[in-house]
Amino acid sequence: ALRTRAFRLIAMMYLLVGIGLQMINAHIVAYSELKGLPPMTAAIVLSAISGASIPGRIISGMISDRIGRKSTLAACVFLEGMMILGLMRASSAGPIFLLAAAFGLGYGGHATQFPALIGEMLGLSHMGAILGAAVFFWGIGGALGPILAGRIFDLTGDYSSAFIIGAIAMLLAVAASFFLLVGRVISSDLKPEIVEQLKKNQGIGQPKHHLQDSKGIDFSGLIDHKKKAEQYRELLLLD
């Protein structure tokens, strides 16, 4: 799974999201003070991000059950990117708190959707190892983002350029998600006899085959690839 195109895309998304997320988390207090907020109020802005991430995790889970993990993840990361751009224009406590809270919703959403998407696309048998490898790239991005923003601020005395980079990183992660082909099933998660059945029933528009596994799962009529992928994930993935 670590050599697949899907893993490379997810790892890249983790890297990019880490850059944008940790850049904001590390510098939002200093940025808020730069905008005129008292130190204590500026610190609460960071708490607003963390606090809003809690309902973000719950809400995103509910939404993903309806529209899918990939779409929900992309929406959450897009929200974060837009809120970073919005923070650049905010000049008072109210808008800063509102934008920070919305950013936190997206943060909480992507935190739950990344593991769910990995399980959905790369299987459950080795999910711990796969997730650990993917989060490694998030850590790299999380280290780069704050350092980059700090360096830019030291050179320019302003966070605008850094925040633009953070927003671009988030939007590039959204773009990368479009290349993920949801519905791929890792064969190591399937019974060997089912893998053989799947190989015989791969084409779109082929005649229907009456296929059943040892538990009596009927494969008849599974002609459309997307429909097949959804049913295979639900019925056949084994831990």
Image (tube, grey):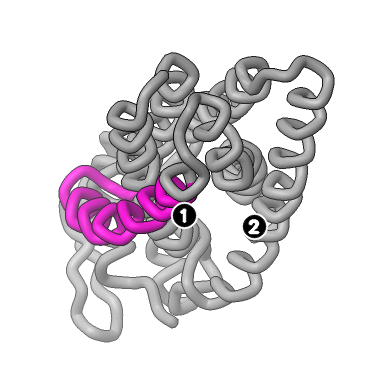
- Where residue 233 sits: x, y (%)? 32, 63
In this rendering, position of residue 42 left or right of residue 215: right
Q: Which residues are magenta?
A: 43-70
For marks 2 and 1, the one nearer the N-term is 1
Q: Main secondary structure of the magenta part?
A: helix
The three-letter code of the residue at mark 1 reads: Phe
Rounded to the nearest whole Å, what is the CA distance between mark 2 and mark 1? 9 Å
Q: Nearer the viewer, residue 199 or 47?
A: 47
Where, quadrant-wise, is the C terminus in this rendering? bottom left
Rendered view: 135 above or below 126:
above
Q: Quadrant of residue 21?
A: top right
Kindly indicate whether the residue at mark 1 contacts the one at mark 2 (C-beta within 8 angstroms): yes
Q: Nearer the viewer, residue 94 or 129?
A: 94
Rendered view: 23 above or below 96:
below
Looking at the rendered structure, the secondary structure element under dot 1 is: helix
- Where residue 41 sits: x, y (%)? 42, 45
Query: Is residue 201 magenta-colored?
Result: no
Residue 211 visible, this angle:
yes
Q: Quadrant of residue 1?
A: bottom right
Q: Nearer the viewer, residue 117 or 91?
A: 91
Tell me which residue sits at (71%, 31%) in the image.
Answer: 149
| Residue topped by disc 1 | 114
| Residue topped by disc 2 | 134
Tell me which residue sits at (43%, 14%) in the image.
Answer: 89
Farthest residue in the front direction?
38
Looking at the rendered structure, the secondary structure element under dot 2 is: helix
The three-letter code of the residue at mark 2 reads: Ala
